[in-house]
Structures are given as structure tokens and as C-alpha cells.
Image (cartoon, rainbow, N blue to C red):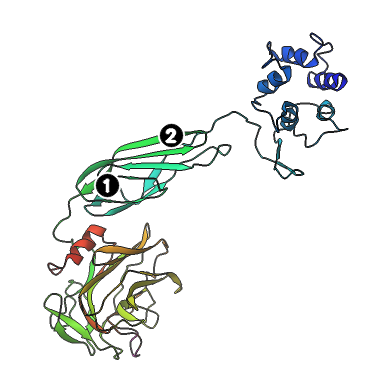
Amino acid sequence: MQSVQQTYVYNQTAGAVTETVNGNWLQAYCEFLGVTDPVNNSWLQALCNHFGITQPLFGSWTIALANYYGITQPLNGTWWYALSQASGTPPVEPFTWVGNGTLWEVETRIWNVGVLYPPVADFTSDFTIIDEGDPVQFTDTSTVDPYGPAITDWSWEFTGGTPTGSTGQNPLVTYGATGEFAVSLTVTNNDGSDTKIVPNYITVNAVSSAISLVDLQLYFPFNGTATDDSGNTNTTTQDSATFGTGKFGQAAVINATDSNATRLTAKAWGVANAYSLSAWINLNALTSTNQIITNDASFAGGRLWQFRSNNGSLEFIRFNAAGGVCANFAGGSISTGVWTHVAATFDTTVGSKLYINGTQVATNSNLEPNNNSSTGSIGIGMGYPGTVAAPLNGSIDEAILYSRALTAGEITILAAGTQPLM
């Protein structure tokens, strides 16, 4: 054993160490490196510790030292013989035992036994300035060194929020009172933890009792006429829609077997990157395609969306600039015989959201914009013009289109049902 240790020491010191110290080659090598004391009466452990190896491998400091040099197996039956053949500095990519008894693999890092890599806490959110009642989606963006263990625990604190805390990685939080509120995130892995606290991170503003009319594109109160009261120049065709009792005043009554209800034509909508759809509906029956506000392929000028009730669920289908479906999702439950507020919003920064009676019921993360060049018709309570495809079976009131994504607080005001938009 001594002869192979001598060869190992001679090679590692480029021939500088030629004699033992107290009959021990490893003590001679340690003292050559500036290590003056053994660890646990072991010069081998002292040498390993000097190289940053702080624990044995499979119970052996010799195997740990061999691993440090990238040696995968003993030679001539011994690890020291294999070490005696090592020359130069240890490799940058040592081998790591996989654990199946026969296989070694390269791990692309320097051997760093004993070095701790705690995480670094960080986070973002979809909004930092909101109205009362709006939700905020928080996203964990914490990092950990590639050599460190993965994050295992998240601990959030939300002053003024509901919930006030969470152990989820990406929680959704609602703020019901005005003010400025701090957010705190602590992340933990096996090597430690880190906390990030941001004072006044969330600003919550009071909700006005009225909704801004900025970016209002269409507004149909249906009080005896199919007139657009938004103030924009929109050509409308009433077709066969009639009028009856509405949520506010009168509403358009749609025959479920009629293809044409109310149409708008020759309008460059410009709602590719952000828009909102809102209406009150009262369904007679739950069918697969109760169209609410729709712009689809059969309308000249390009397709934008289908917003409809599908067997009682609220459904939103969006089409990209190429005319393909980029989002198709549904949620919630709509009943027959009662007035129900429904809304959909889209923005290229946050995706799409669906609401029933002011409550968010579904989301979709696709951010593709719609066709910005569409100049075709929009159908209210109808399917495709000239066909019997999917008209609403019931009544519709307060049909609205905005060219921006309304906030959750604004949707809440519309859904409160205390007054029409204007």
C-alpha cells in the first residue's frame, strides 16, 4: 500500500515530496500543502478536507478522494493503485455514483461537498395597482444555484389580502379594502432559506359606482330599438329580434330557431390586443350553442371570437390573426329563467377571463392577439348570418363591447344589477 501512496504523492507534487514524515506519505503530502494537523487522527481525512471533501463516499474517504479525481473504479483491485495513476490536477467534472451498483455518470460541476446553496427569494404579480375586490395572481420567481437543492417550501404573507398567507408556489389573492399593502415571500430548500419583503407592493383603489366609458365600442340597451348607444358610428340591422321585459327596461328577445337577430356591419373594431364583452341574458333552455356576442368566420372581414353558453357553461373561443383557434375554454354554470350577468375579458399581457354574476369562473393563459383587420359583422344573440346556426334561446340586455380589458372591480359593478351602463 505504501508504494502506491508514494507514487500518488510523487505524481501530485511533481516529484517535490520524496520522503515520508513519521513514515506516512499522506502526512508528507499534507504538510507539503500546508496542512499541519490530521483530522480525527487521519491524514487521509485531512487531505480530503483540504480538497473540500467533507464526507466519505460509501463510508470510504479513499473512494471519495478517487471520485474527486474522476476515477470510476479501482485498478488491480485497489483504489490506491488507481489513484497512483492519476496525474496533474483533478478533473473539472468528477464522476458521481448513480446508485445501481454498476454505473457511474459525469456530473457537470466541480465537487463541492459541504458548500451550501440556499435559494434567493423573488416574485412578481400580474397587477400591483388594482381596485377593491380585484384578484392578484402572484408568481414565484425565486432562484437557486444550479449546484443547490430545489426549493421545497414557500411561505407567503399578504397584508390586507384574502387569504392573508399561503404555502402554495403561485397563489391568487383578493384585496377587499383600499390602501397600500406589503407582500412577503420566504423560500426554503435543504441548504437554507431567504425572505423578500416589499412594503406597499399592492395599491388598492376605491371602486367608483360608475364605469368609465373610455374605449366603449358598442352599447345596446335594447329599449325598444336595436340602436347602438355607444356614440360610435355603427350600422345595425335588427332582423327578426323582438323586444320584451329586460333586466333594465326592455331586452331583445331571440327566437332559438331564427338565424338572424341583431347585426352590426362595416366597423373596423381594432380590438386585437384587449377587449371586454358583457351582457345580461335570460335563457329559455340550455343548448350547446346559445350565442351571446359573436364574430366568426362566416362574417365577412375575418373572425375574432365566439362568446356563448354551451349546455349551461359559459364558453369563450378566440381566433388568432390566421383564423385558427388560439383559446377555447369554459367554466361556471348558467341557469334558465333568471337574468344572469356574463362577461369575458382579454388582454395580451394576462390572457382571458370569464365571469358569471361578477365571479371569475375560468381563465386562459394564451396571449395571441386577435385579427386586428376585421371589418365584418358582429352578431348579438345570433350565430352566422343567413343560417340557422346557434342563435340565443332567450333574451339579452345591456350588450357591451369595450376595446380594453375591464378590471374585476368594473365587472363587479356591471354584475351588481343596480343600474344600466348609462
The answer to whether 154 is drawn above or below residue 110 in the figure is: below
Q: Nearer the viewer, residue 65 or 214?
A: 65
Is most of the magenta stretch helix, strand or loop?
A: loop
Q: Which mark is residue 194?
A: 2
Q: Quadrant of the N terminus?
A: top right
Task: Decide whether residue 6 is among the magenta residues.
Answer: no
Residue 11: image quadrant is top right
Looking at the image, is mark 2 or mark 1 earlier in the sequence? 1
Q: CA distance from mark 2 to mark 1?
A: 22 Å
Q: Position of residue 311 (x, y in %)?
A: 35, 79
SS state under label 1: strand
Residue occupying image coordinates x 36% and y 73%: 305
Q: Position of residue 334 (x, y in %)?
A: 28, 74
Task: Decide whether residue 387 is among the magenta residues.
Answer: yes
Q: Nearer the viewer, residue 284 or 290?
A: 284
Write the start and end of the magenta stretch as one range. Answer: 384-388
